[in-house]
Image (cartoon, rainbow, N blue to C red):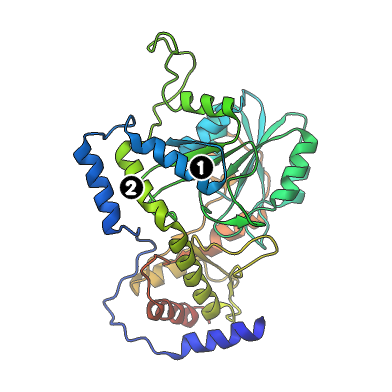
Amino acid sequence: MKARIRKNSMKFMKKKSKLNKDNFFPVSIPLITKKDILSVNESLRSGWISSNGPNVKKFEELFSKYVERKFSIAVSNGTAALEVAVKALGIKKNDEVIIPNFTIISNALAVIRQQAKPILVDCDLENWNMDINEIKKKITKKTKAIIVTHIYSFSNDMDEILKLCKKKKILVIEDAAEVIGLDYKNKKCGSFGDISTFSFYSNKQITTGEGGMISVNNKKLYEKCKSLRNLCFGKVNRFNHDDIGWNYRMTNIQASLGLSQIKNIDKVIKKKMTIGKRYYFNLFKNKNIKMLPPSSVHSKNIYWVVGIVIKNKKILASDLAKKLNTLGIMTRPFFWPMHEQDIFKKMKIFKKSKFPNSSYLARYGLYLPSYYKLKNIEIDHISRIVNKILV
């Protein structure tokens, strides 16, 4: 395997870049096809532009089939999906919900909104997901649920987590926002646990501009999520609401884009994996760079983003980002850990605990341009510059 990687690395880096100095490479550009545009235009022409349009239901059904779930509920974004999921499972004040410390703030917000207590778990440096041994240490009698967020590249070890949660009677919210289309042991991420959430933000594998999805197998949970995303209108008297819900609906325009986008999802995922592998072959020999490999024991690397971590602690990711930006290469920093968020410090939500792995990744990790239309010569050009800076 290593010999093949070295051979590919040499082959990729032999070609000299023919790019001019004015080239600029964004981190992400959504793939919008002519068929996508036609699909949206048809929705506009039909007059069905709100959430009552037929494409919302069609998109939900098609997405359910893709992620191997019985039911799906389209919502306005991935954060909304998490908030609905947490409330739908009956999480209440003072309940404890285990979440990753290294993740987007939405995980914590969904728990806090229900006046429950988020319990942080540090990540594993080998895959950037939650450390299962740390999860075990954080479980108490008050633990009601865990948000299992697949971070950037690889899936969590779902067999181990589900086994643990079943034994402890803990509910599982699977946040698959970053890994739509990734398989864990030949089964789609987002098909595990009690409820799953997804995001269709512009940098995801498929996009509806903004948008999200909740997927379940339980009919009662499905009905509860549908109600929560739609202001919990009354069943007898529509305007006599039976719970506190939100207007988190997806529009028919967004759904029409999603219906078109999902037809290309396998092609997009395949291309993203090809881009990620090429970066890996170009950069893995650099002793100052840590990258996740193309595959793990449980899954392939989906390369939603192409992340690199600087090993030389004299160079911060923010310093590298500034240098690359002057050369026309845009980057994005890794997640800033929950325990270091300014707002949570003010709220005094978390005790003064140390999460060394999360803190390290936040300061020394960033991701590189990896959009669908990025060419091989451009990947090699970017890789060459990164290698030159991080000597």
Residue shown at the point (47%, 87%) measured from the top left:
13
Q: Is residue 346 visible?
A: no
Q: How many marks?
A: 2
Q: Nearer the viewer, residue 58 or 171?
A: 58
Q: Which mark is residue 64?
A: 1
Secondary structure of residue under mark 1: helix
Q: Which mark is residue 257?
A: 2
Name the mark nearer the viewer: 1 or 2.
1
As drawn, is 167 to the left or to the right of 80? right
Residue 338 x/y as whole percent: 57, 45
Label 1 crowd (10 A; few <14 / some 14-19 / many >=20)? many
Dot placed on the residue nearer the N-terminal end, 1 or 2:
1
Residue found farthest to the left: 45
Residue shown at the point (66%, 82%) measured from the top left:
2
Residue 304 x/y as whole percent: 49, 60
- Decide: is 294 above or below 140: below
Q: Nearer the viewer, residue 110 or 298?
A: 298
Residue 289 x/y as whole percent: 57, 74
The amino acid type of the residue labelled 1 equals Ser
Residue shown at the point (61%, 47%) measured from the top left:
101
Q: Nearer the viewer, residue 93 or 154?
A: 154
The amino acid type of the residue labelled 2 equals Leu
Secondary structure of residue under mark 2: helix
Residue 201 x/y as whole percent: 40, 48
Q: Quadrant of residue 1?
A: bottom right
Label 2 crowd (10 A; few <14 / some 14-19 / many >=20)? many
Between the C-alphas of marks 1 and 2, the distance is: 16 Å
As drawn, is 85 to the left or to the right of 3? left
Q: Is residue 284 visible?
A: yes
Q: Which mark is residue 80?
A: none
As drawn, is 22 to the left or to the right of 367? left
Residue shown at the point (73%, 49%) measured from the top left:
159
